[in-house]
Amino acid sequence: MLRRIWTISTVLSFSRIALLAPLAYFLFADVPNNRVWAAGVMLLAAATDFLDGYLARRLHQVTDFGKIIDPLADKIAVGAATIMLVMVGALQFWYVALVIVRDVLILLGGLYIKSKKNIITQSNWPGKIAVFFVTLVMLMSVLNQAALEGLTQVVIWASVVFMGASFVIYVQRLFVGISRAKKGHS
């Protein structure tokens, strides 16, 4: 059992949470090129997000634990990083609130379905695209380049659209799961 928990993929998932410490350091410390270093940490975290799923499939290490910890690590890392970006004035509060509220609702819905039907909900493609755009928003915001301001706004709204689309899919899955759970108890 322990071997199935500690796979390369789950270690990579946990590393996203661990990378919050150096991210916080570079965002809040007065060190040369701190924003560039912070962007580098974000890119490293994004690479672990890509690699954990890829390696889990490639090495045949897909586990129920991995299906839970990967999105949970994403939500913790993105939530904490976006809060830090609000604190340093790099992101607006409304955007971060939207990201966090969506993630919390998806997490709670997933936990509900897991408890009622023992189904682990997985990510959907609009959600993966939304995470890509949210990551891009975070990178562009931390680098804070005036030349990218217009493009940053486009990426923000693209992320909002994909967050909305993925949320609708998650809500549909929730209702299908609830419906199946009720039929199973009838």
Image (cartoon, rainbow, N blue to C red):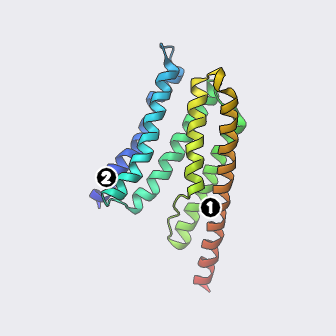
Image quadrant in which you'd find residue 17? top left
Give the residue displayed 55% in from the left and 61% down from the top: 111
Label 2 or label 1, whichever lies nearer to me, is: 1
Asked whether the viewer can see residue 98, the reply is no
- Judge from the rendering whether residue 59 lies leftward or rightward of residue 141; answer left or right: left
Q: Which residue is nearer to you in this view: 74 or 87?
A: 74
The residue that mark 1 highlights is 170
Q: Amino acid at mark 1?
A: Tyr
- Judge from the rendering whether residue 116 lies leftward or rightward of residue 155; answer left or right: left
Question: How many other residues sit within 10 Å of disc 1, few (<14), some (14-19) or many (≥20)?
Answer: many
Q: Amino acid at mark 2?
A: Trp
Q: Secondary structure at mark 1?
A: helix
Q: Quadrant of the C terminus?
A: bottom right
Which percent across, then down, holds residue 183?
Answer: 62, 83
Which percent across, then down, holds residue 13?
Answer: 41, 46
In space, the residues marked 2 and 1 are separated at their CA atoms by 28 Å
Give the residue displayed 48% in from the left and 33% down from the top: 42
The residue that mark 2 highlights is 6
Give the residue displayed 66% in from the left and 21% down from the top: 146
